[in-house]
Image: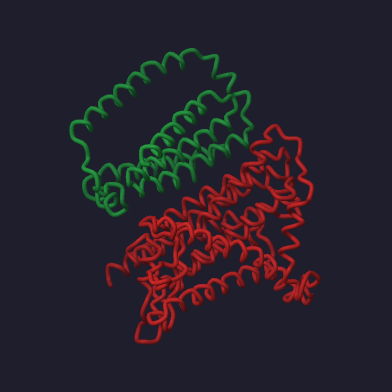
Chain colours: A green, B red
Amino acid sequence: MERALFLSFALTAIVAALNVLWRRHPLHSALALLVVLGALTGLYILLGAYFLAVVQVIIYAGAILVLFLFVIMLLNIRAEEARLERRPIFRWLAVPFALLLGAEIVYLVRVFEENPIPSGTSIGVTEAVGRELFTTYLLPFEITSIVILIAILGAVVLARRG
Amino acid sequence: MDVVVEAVVKIVVVFGIVLTFLAYLALFERKILGWIQLRYGPNRVGPWGLLQPLADLLKFLFKEDVRPMTPNPLLFSVAPILSLVPALMTYAVIPFGDRIELFGREIALYITSVNVGLLYLFALSGLGVYGIVLAGWASNSKYSLLGGLRSAAQLISYELTLTLSVVGVLIQAGSLDLVEIVRAQSGTYFGLIPKWHVFWYQPLGFLLFFIAAVAETNRVPFDLPEAETELVAGYHTEYSATKFAMFYVAEYANILAVSALATTLFLGGWNGPGVERMPLLGVFYFAAKTAIFLFIYIWLRATLPRFRYDQLMRFGWKVLLPLAFANIVLSSAMAVIA
């Protein structure tokens, strides 16, 4: 049962992710991304990481992707895609990044094969995540909040200028 | 196996009751509007118009499904479903009552109780935006597009207040599980005032939650996405027949869900006198409290004019949001003191 669910979620995620790249229309790509996020949510739930599953839907699907849609709809982007295609440098840049990402995946799989997380640990539950964030990872957490604050101020400044 | 059967039965029962109630909610709304405006309201179909929902249903099913010329017929059809499904999924975590004895086994009067229940609800409310935005876009009509965009901006703005207004409740109850939140509100202070969050100490949180909830459900005075004087009918201008009915049901499903949630978070859910001895009584308390909110919703619609768009945004960002932050600071301070 669990394996069947895993396979169906994983397959959905991959097919939808390919669709994000292949679709010509930016809105269709954005919707394919929504499907990817949904499939990932399913995978998180299978892992028992309920908090991550839900938070991912709230933030990525509920906020960020809606903003994507908003921008696509407001600007009615069509001309943009033709322009980007003509810059070959983006295609060549993709190769080293893809290699880097592949290497990271292989490394992570190796690491977790050697010392897997024992099943039944509650890593993704609200309390566990909160405790970790405010003890072990306090500094990165606070730095992230400052970065976000700066980004908000930057957005306000840019909007004022325009 | 028993667990699966129990879950399926519960889901069927809850959805049966909820969907029937939603049909009648529309009738009650028209009746109450009529009463407030000194008219009769629907009274032709059946006694006191009680069969009106049935007639409406038949009408929606058999009407012609008019489609606009759109480059995205698939999205046009999927949008109402995207709007309805999240609205109905909310009922999975709402606790209608405590555990009761039935047929010799203990049955909980909620479909499920997850430890991220409240976040799950916020995730669903975030997904509800898609149906409206995509409907506006796929309709290939200016009124629909403007309605969809307005709606997206409004929902994102008020979602912040909605989420932040509940943080106080979380601090006080110490759980994201709705059942635990209701349990935390049982009992009384000095044997008189119930320990509901609205009395002590989340009155501000309650007010913010309710205002933001009205905005989230696109209701008067925040019904700009479908402001008929400017936008014909907003995002669902081009919809007809069954697809229109889906938007219609989704709107009422959201209203009912938000009212039930306000009851759960702030008015003590199923708590009331005598519930410890007779758990089934809790369902009636829950229904009565929810009904108060539903009445207020309709009352608002009958009495208030609509906000202008810039007023709506200013109110959301410059009044409600700072108050919500203040409420979090206050709640944290109270938690530390207590």
Give the quarter of the image for residue A143: top left
In the drawing, does residue A68 fall left or right of residue B309?
Answer: left
The residue lying at 69 percent from left, 65 percent from top is: B305
Residue B294, how many percent across, how many down? 60, 69
> Left or right: B12 with respect to B38?
left
Q: Is residue B21 above or below residue B67?
A: below
Residue A72: image x %, image y %? Answer: 59, 34
Can you give x and y, in whole percent of width and height, for residue B191 in the image? 36, 87
Q: What is the tally of numbered marks visible in this picture?
A: 0
Residue extending farthest left: A115
Q: Residue at x 23, y 33 (%)?
A: A112
A103 sits left or right of A68 in the view: left
Inspect this view and state whether residue B205 appears. Answer: no
Quarter of the figure that contains the N terminus of chain B: bottom left
Residue A18: where, in percent of width, then height?
A: 48, 26
**The one of B218 and A83 positioned closer to us in this rendering:** B218
- As drawn, which residue projects farthest toward the right? B44
